[in-house]
Amino acid sequence: MATATSAIRVEGVTKRYGAVTALEAVSLEVERGEFLTLLGPSGSGKTTLLRVIAGLERPDDGRVYLGGEDVTDVPPYRRRVHTVFQQYVLFPHLNVYRNVAFGLEQKRLSRREIERRVAAALELVRLSGYERRWPHELSGGEQQRVALARALVLEPEALLLDEPLAALDLQLRKEMQRELKRLQREVGISFLLVTHDQEEALALSDRIAVIADGRLQQIGTPREVYERPETAFVATFLGAANVLEAEILHRENGDALLGLCGHTVRVPLNGRRIEGSRAQVAIRPEKIALRARPLRRTDLVQLEGVIEECLYLGEATHWRVRVGEHYVTVTEPNRPGSKADAFRDGQRVFLCWTRESIVVLSR
Amino acid sequence: MSARARTSPILAVWMGATYLFLYAPILVLAVFSFNDSRLLAVWRGFTWTWYKAALSNPPMLDALRTSLLIAALTTLIATALGTSAVLALERWRGRLRSLSETLFVLPIVVPEIVVGFASVTFFGWIGLRLGLLTVLIAHVAFSVSYVFFVVRARLATLDPRLEEAAMDLGANPWRVFWKVTLPLLAPAIAASALLVFTLSLDDYVITSFVAGAGATTLPLRIYSMIKTGITPEVNAISTLLLLVTLALMALAFRIERRGMTRTHLVLVGLLLLGLVGFAFGDSVARRPRATLNVLIWSNYISSRVVRAFEEKTGVKVNIETYDSNEALLAKLQAGVVTYDLIVPSDYMVRILIRENLLQPLDLTRLPNLRHLDPSALGLPFDPTNTYSLPYTRGITGIGYRKDKIAAPIGSWADLWEARWRERIVMLDDMREVFGAALKLLGYSLNSTDPEQLRQARDLLRRQKPLVRAYDSANFDQLLLSGEAWIAQAWDGQILKARRENPNIEFVIPREGTTLIVDNLCIPRSAERPDLAHEFINFLLDPTVAAENMNEIMYLMPNRSAWPRLRPELQRHPIFSLPPEVLRRSEYLQDLGPTTVLYDRYWTEVKLAR
Amino acid sequence: MRETNANRWLLLAPSALWLLLFFLLPLGLIVVMSFAERGLYGGVRWTFGLWNYRQAMAPLYLWVYGRSFALAAVTTALCLVVSYPVAYYIALRADPKWKNLLLVLSILPFWTSFLLRTYAWMFLLRVEGFVNTTLLALGVIERPISWLLYSDFAVVIGQVYGELPFMILPLYVALERVDVRVMEAAMDLGANRRQVFWRIVLPLTRPGIITGIVLVFIPSLGAFITPDLLGGAKSAMIGTVIQNQFVQRNQPMGSALSVLLVVVVLALLWIASRTARSRRGR
C-alpha cells in the first residue's frame, strides 16, 4: 500500500483565528489509496485541517504536501485534491450535467471528452440519466452523489470529504457509507473523510486520526484506536470507557504494578511510556462482568461495589456501580440466561475483568 | 478564509471613488452655502447670509409648510390604505388577488411624467379645482403602492402560526390583530411611512402638473428658484434639508438596530410636534384676512411691493410664476385653477378673451387708472380695455457680455454666429424664437405663410448646435455667471443684470423685434376678484409703480411714476430706438389655425439634434 | 377581522377605489384621448383617428425615442458597472463591522431630494462652477470646459447620480445571497478567481442584475428633471417632449406619446420578468 511518497502529507500545521487556535502543530500522512478518517467533535479543527489541505485556508505555520510536492502556497484551484462539501454545495444555477462538467470545463478538453468523462462519473455514482435534472429537484442522497461525481470526475490525487453524510437520515447514511467504501475501492485513490460520527469512522476507515482541541490525539487502525486508546479523550470519544485514576507502584519488563481502587494489579504496558507516579487507565464497559460473588481466579481484577442504577436498553443493559469513590459503567449484552434481572439497585456486586482489558493512558 | 481574503487595491480605490462620487457633490453644495459670494464657485470667506435669506423668505417657508402638510396627510392616508389592502389580500388566492397586485404595481412602473400628465388631464376633465386636494389625491395614488409592497413583504415573512397560537390562547380575531399582527407589522409600516413621507416631500414632476393656486410645494418653489438662477440661497436650503434628512435617517437606523427606546420616542415625538407646530402654527397665529393668488412671469414683481400690499391690507399674496404665455394658457386650460390675477402678454390676452377665460374689469374700482399713459390704452388686442390693463411694456433684444465679445452686436444674425458656439442662449418661448428667425429672414414675426415658417424652422434647426440652452427665466443669470455670452433677452432683466456687471449690454437688433405689453387680467375662475382689483389699483399707484419698476427694471406705462425712475430706466434703449427699427418691430398677434403649424415646427426644432 | 369576505372587501375597497379612480381612470382617459384631435387653442375635439400615433411614428419622434433609449441605456450600463464592484465589496468582502454602515452610506443619498441632488450637479458643472474653477486653478485646463453643463454628458451624470442607489441595493441583496461555500466549491474544482466570478457569482446574481436594470432603466427612460435642468431644455427626451405637448396644449399628442411610453415600459418589464424567470433557458 505504501509507495515512495504519500498522497497527502501535513507537517506541523498551525492555524489561528485571532485568539483562537484551530490547529496546533498537526502532522499527518495519508498514503496512496488509503481511506483515512479525521474524527473529532465539532470545533476540534478537523474541518479546518481539511480546508488547509484543499487550499481554502492558509496555515499560519507548517507545510502541506500533495504527492510529495509542497503546495502550501498554491491556490486551491491549482491543487489536485477536490472536496465533497458539507451539504454538498452544488451550483444551484447549473444542472447535474453542468455541475459535474464544471471542473472539466476549466481545462481545455473537447466536448466529446467532457461528455464521456461526465457520463462515466455519473455512471460511477449510479446517476446516469440525471444529466438534465436541477439540484433543487434532487434528494439529499442524489445531491450527495452529484457532489461526489463532480469531484471524482477530475481524477484527483485525493478526495476530501467534509461530513458528507451528516445531513442524511440514518437509513440513507448507512447505505451511503457502503457506497463510499465501494467507490473508494473502485477508484483506488486516497479518501480523507471528516466526521464526528465514530461508527462511521470505524466502519469506513483504513486508519482513523482522532483530533481534539486542534491537536492530533491518536492515529491508527480502527482496532488500534478502539482497543488501545492513548488518551482519556480518545477512550471516551470513540466508544464508552471507564477512566479511573491509578497509582504506579512499580515498573518492570514492560509491565506496571498499579494501585487501582485499593487493589494491586499488574498491567501490560504494550510499549507505552508513562511518567510520574500516577496514571489514568481505561476499561471498556463491555469488558467488565458483574458477579454476585467473587470468582476464585487470580488472573482477574475483581472489585466490590454497589449498584446505583440499571438501564435496560434492549440489546444490552447498562449498570452504574459505585466502587469506593469511583463510579464504573458496565454493559452486558442481553443474551438468553443473562442475569439482567438478577441484580437490583443497592445490591452489592463484584466487577471482574482481565488484566489485558486495562489500558494505561498517557496524559 | 482564502475565498474572502485580500481585497484587491483596485476594488478599494473603486469603492473610494464611488463614495466620493456619491458625497462630493452634496459636500461641495453645503460648503458653498457658506460662501460670501453670490455667483462664484471660488471661496470668498464665510457667511451666514444665505441661511438668513432662506429662513426669512416667506414664499419659501410657505412652500415648506405646504409640503409638510401634504406629506403628512399623504403618509397618513397612504399608510392606512396600503396596510388595509395588504390585510385584505392576505391568503386570498385567485384572480382577484393577481388583479389587485397588477393594480398596485402600476403606479410604481408607470413613468411619473405620464402619471402627472394623465392626472391633470383627468382633473381638468371632471372639473376638479387644482390645489391642495388634487396634489394630495395624486400623492396618495402614487405612494399607496409602496406601502402595499413594503408591508406585504413583511407579512410574507411572518409565521402564520403566531396568529394561530394567539387564537389558540383565546384571543379573538380583533385582539389577534391588535396584539399580534399589527405589532409584528409595525416596523414595515413605519418604514413605508418614512418612504412615503420622503417621496411626497420630494416629488416634483407629478406635483408640477396637478398643483394649482396655493399648492406650491417646496420642490416647486425650489425648481422655480433653480430655473431663475443659481444662488447660494438654494445651497443653504439644500444643506438644511439634507441635514434634516440625514438626522431622520440616522434616527431611523438607530431605532431599527437597537429598537425603540424612550429617548427615541421622545425625540420622534418632539420632531413630530415641531413639524406640526411649524406647519400649522403660523397660520393659526396670524391668520391672513384672505389670500390673493397671483400667477405672474418670473422676475416680474418686486417682493417689497408685495409685502407693502400685504401689510396695508392684511391680505396674503401668493405669487406663482410661469415662463411663457403658452405655459400660462396651458395652466389655465388644464383644469380648474383659481388664480385671481394673471399677467398675459398682448396676443395671449386676445386668446384668453376668445377662450372666455377672463372676466371684465370693473374700471370704477381702479381710480389709479388715470396715471396710465393713454398711448398704452385701447390697444388692438383689447380695444376697450374691458379685460386688461397694461402692466409693463417690454422689448425683446440681445443681451451680451462685451468683455467676452469684442465684435459689435446689433443683428439677430449674431445669435447664429459660430464663434459663440455653446455660448448662445435663446428664450424658451416659441413665438420669440420664431420671431427672431422670421425677422432675420426679413419676414413679419406674425407670418402665417407656411413657406416662410419652414425657412424659419430650418434656420433655427441650423442654429441649434450653437445654442447652449433655451431659457426664459434665467438668461440674465447665465450672462452674469459667464455660462452664456450672448442671449436673446427681454429688456428688464438685462438692465437689472447690468447693475451687477456693467459689461453686460442690451441691444435691439436692426431687423426689428417684438414689442410687448404685458397686462393685468382677472381670470373668469378667480375666487377673489375684489382683492384682485384692490391689488391692481395698488400696483397702479405711482409710488408703488416706481418702486416696482426700479426693482424689476421693466418699464410701465405709468406717467406719474416716470419722474421717480432710476436714471438707467430713464435712458432705456426703447426711448432711443431708431424709427426704422421701430417701424420694423411688431406686437405678437394671435395666429389662429397657424398656431398648430408653429407648435409642430417648434417641436421639430426642440427635437432636432 | 379577516374572517369574512365582506370584511375583506371593506378593507380592500378604499385603496382599490382610490387607485381605480385616480390612477387607472386617468390612464384610461389618456388612452381614449390619444385617438382624439387637438383643439385649436387647446382642448380636445372628440373625433377619433390614428393621426397622433402616425405622427409619433415620424422620424422626428422615433429619433427622440432612440435618444431616450440610448441615454437610459448608457445610464443603466454606467450604474451597473459602477455599482457591481461596490455591492460585491459590501456583500462579500467588507468587514462585517462596517458592512451595514457602508450599505447605509451607499443608499442614503436616495433619501435626499432628487431635485437638490440635480441642483448640486448644476452647481458643480457650470462654466464658472466648481469643477471648472478647480481644474483651472490646478492648471489641468486652460479654458473652462463648456460642455459640462447643458449637455447629454450632464444629463447622464445627473441620472446616474440619482439612480445609483437603485442599482446598488438589488445587486447587494443578490450578492449577499451568494453562498461563499459555492464559490469555494468552484475554486476547489479548479476555477480561479476570475472564473469563479464569471461562472458562479455573475450567473447567480442575474436576478439582482435584472432588477437593478429595471429599476434604473425605466425611470431614466421617462426622466424629466435631469434633461430639463442639466440638459438645458434642448436635449429632447420623451419626458420633456410629453411635458412640451402639455405646454403646447396638445393633449391628444401628449396622450399618444404617454401611451407609447407606458406600452414600451410594460413590454420591457414583461421581457425582464421572463428573463429573470427562465434561468434554465439557455
Image (spheres, coloured by chain):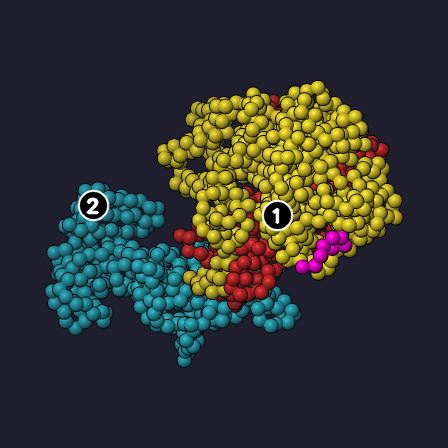
Chain colours: A cyan, B yellow, C red
Is the C terminus of chain B in the top left, top right, bottom left or bottom right quadrant? bottom right
Percent position (x, y) of residue B597? Answer: 83, 43
Residue B364: mark in rendering = none
Subunit of label 1: B
Would residue C39 be counted in the magenta stretch? Answer: no
Q: Tell me the CA gap for discs 1 and 2.
A: 112 Å
Density class for disc 1 (Cα within 10 Å; few <14, some 14-19, many ≥20) is: many
Subunit of label 2: A
Q: Which residue is at the far top?
A: B364
Q: Residue at x 50, y 68 (%)?
A: A77
Q: Which amino acid does label 2 sit on?
A: Ile
Above or below residue B216? Residue A314 is: below
Residue B498: mark in rendering = 1
Q: Which amino acid does label 1 sit on?
A: Arg
Q: Residue at x 14, y 69 (%)?
A: A251
* Secondary structure of residue under mark 1: helix
Above or below residue B147? Residue A311 is: below
B378 and B180: which one is in front?
B378
Please give left or right for residue C78 compared with residue B609 in the image: left
What is the tally of numbered marks visible in this picture? 2
Contact between marks 1 and 2 (CB within 8 A): the answer is: no
Percent position (x, y) of residue C44? Answer: 80, 32
Q: Which residue is drawn at 69% across and 25% down?
A: B369
Magenta segment range?
A: B406-414
Percent position (x, y) of residue B127? Answer: 71, 25
Q: What secondary structure prevails in the magenta region?
A: loop
Is the N terminus of chain B in the top left, top right, bottom left or bottom right quadrant? bottom left
For label 2, the residue is: A307
Percent position (x, y) of residue B124? Answer: 72, 29
Q: Can residue B143 be seen in this view?
A: no
